[in-house]
């Protein structure tokens, strides 16, 4: 890869729920300067490798230890979330928290239900863009929009979102307020 390439990373389980074929189809319709790395393992890994064999701008790599994954993520430009278009319940992948923590812009290919909730969260907080899974035209449009604005996304916005929603302090506050209510005074 060259310094001018835009590198996007999906890391984690490569199974049916992730429907990574959407990311492969996105790579096919984009110029070669947009590179994609699918990193991990799962039931679909071998099938994905075969599908990507002749596509120049996408690579499927085997699972690596956590520290190595984090190094991959640091050098990438965009973090990818991908969910199967057939989902009918809201889903919030744990990797969202990791992307937010290191201020990584997020491209999310989501089912209709998750798009309403996770998608709204990402776009309202100005930390990523969302496209409907399977809608390759919308995915391309939104991905290119993210590439265009990624350097304008503010580290402060990521830090604010992390502190308000994902920090240990915010988790404790939710636990205290919602679960314990008035039963505990600290």
Image (tube, rainbow, N blue to C red):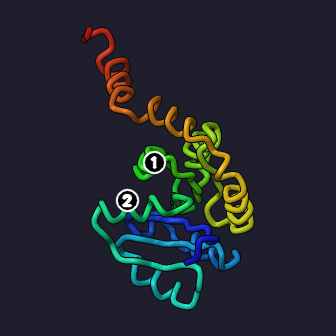
Of residues 51 and 157, the one nearer the viewer is 157
Where residue 115 appears, as percent x and y from the top left, is 60, 49
Q: CA distance from mark 1 to mark 2?
A: 10 Å
Which residue corresponds to mark 1?
A: 102
Q: Is residue 70 above or below residue 113?
A: below
| Residue 83 marker | none
Q: Residue at 69% across / 68% down in the picture?
A: 136
| 104 with respect to 184 (left or right) | right
Where residue 165 appears, as percent x and y from the top left, is 45, 32
Where residue 105 appears, as percent x and y from the top left, is 57, 52
Q: Is residue 167 above or below residue 91?
A: above
Q: Residue at 50% across / 48% down in the picture?
A: 89
Report which quarter residue 56 is drawn in. Answer: bottom right
The mark nearer the N terminus, 1 or 2, is 2
**Farthest bottom residue?**
54
State which quarter of the image contains the C terminus: top left
Of residues 36 and 25, the one nearer the viewer is 36
Q: Residue at 36% across / 75% down in the picture?
A: 43
Where residue 52 appears, as percent x and y from the top left, is 53, 84
Secondary structure type for disc 2 = helix
Q: Residue at 57% across / 70% down in the picture?
A: 23
Task: Mark 1 and mark 2 in contact? Answer it, CB < 8 Å.
Answer: yes
> Mark 2 packing: few (<14 Cα in 10 Å), some, or many (20+)?
some
| 158 with respect to 167 (left or right) | right
| Residue 70 marker | 2
């Amino acid at each position: 890869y060259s310094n001018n390439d835009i590198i996007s990373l999906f890391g984690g389980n490569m199974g049916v729920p992730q429907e990574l074929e959407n990311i492969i189809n996105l790579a096919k319709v984009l110029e070669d300067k947009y590179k994609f790395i699918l990193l991990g393992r799962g039931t679909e890994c071998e099938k994905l490798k075969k599908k990507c064999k002749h596509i120049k701008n996408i690579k499927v790599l085997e699972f690596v230890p956590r520290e190595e994954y984090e190094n991959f993520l640091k050098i990438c430009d965009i973090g990818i979330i991908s969910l199967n278009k057939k989902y009918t319940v809201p889903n919030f992948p744990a990797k969202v928290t990791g992307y937010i923590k290191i201020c990584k812009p997020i491209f999310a290919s989501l089912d209709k239900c998750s798009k309403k909730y996770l998608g709204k969260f990402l776009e309202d907080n100005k930390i990523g863009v969302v496209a409907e899974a399977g809608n390759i035209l919308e995915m391309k449009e939104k991905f290119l929009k993210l590439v265009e604005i990624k350097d304008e996304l503010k580290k402060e916005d990521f830090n604010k979102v992390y502190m308000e929603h994902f920090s240990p302090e915010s988790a404790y506050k939710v636990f205290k307020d919602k679960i314990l209510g008035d039963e505990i005074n600290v």
